[in-house]
Amino acid sequence: MDQGYKIYGTPEVQSLLQKNNLKFESIDYTPLTELMHEKKLDWLINIPDTYNENKSMYPLRRSSVDLGVPLTTNKEIAIFTTAALRRLKEGQISLKIKSYRDYF
C-alpha cells in the first residue's frame, strides 16, 4: 500500500519489500549515510542480526544516532509504528496536542 513515503531498500531487505509489493528505491549503505547528513532521511529501520550481521550495519546505526535520525532496531516496534502511520494517514486516528495538565 502506497502511503506517500519514499522507501529505500538495502540489498538484504529488497526481496522482502518486493514480496510485500512495496515500492522502493534500491540503495547501498554509503548513500544512506549521505542522506542522513543531508537531513533527507526521516527514519531508519535497521534490525540487527546477531548471527549474520553485515559489517555496514553498525556504522549505519551509529550514524543515525550521531545525526539525530530516529532509529528502530526492533521488528515488532517497526511493524507497530508503520501500522500507526498508516492509520494516521488514513484518518483512523488523530494526534491532538494536549497540555501536560490534561493528563492529571
Image (tube, rainbow, N blue to C red):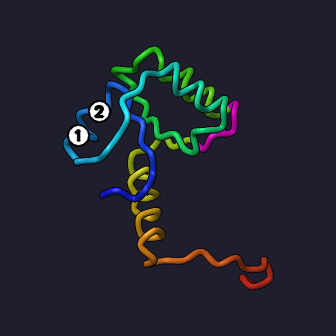
Q: What is the span of residues highlighted in magenta in the rendered image?
A: 66-70
**In which quadrant will I find the N terminus?**
bottom left
Compared with residue 33, is residue 76 higher up or lower down, i.e. above or below? below
Residue 54 coordinates in the image, percent (x, y)? 40, 18
State the residue in front, 69 or 54. 69
Looking at the picture, tell me which residue is in the foreground, 100 or 27.
27
Secondary element at tag 1: helix
Which residue is rendered at x = 46% and y = 62% of the image?
85
Rendered view: 11 above or below 44: above
The quadrant holding residue 15 is top left
Q: Is residue 67 left or right of residue 64?
A: right
Residue 77 x, y percent position in the rendering: 45, 52
Packing grade of label 1 (10 A; few <14, some 14-19, many >=20) is few
Q: Is residue 11 left or right of residue 82?
A: left
Which residue is disc 1 drawn over?
Answer: 18
Q: Which residue is mark 2?
A: 14
Residue 79, quarter of picture: bottom left
Instruction: Give the SS element for disc 2.
Output: helix
Q: Main secondary structure of the magenta part?
A: loop
Quadrant of the rendering where the C terminus is positioned: bottom right
Q: Is residue 80 positioned above or below 44 on the image?
A: below
Please tell me which residue lies in front, 30 or 103: 30
Residue type at mark 2 is: Gln
* Figure disc tally: 2
> Which residue lies at the image location 78% right of the left edge and 79% below the top edge?
99
Tell me whether circle 2 and circle 1 mark residues in contact (CB < 8 Å).
Answer: yes
* Magenta residue check for 30: no
Give x and y (percent) for residue 76. 39, 51
**Residue 49 drawn above or below residue 82:** above
Residue drawn 52% across and 19% down? Answer: 30
Q: Viewed as shown, does residue 48 lie left or right of 62?
A: left
Residue 57's label in the rendered image is none
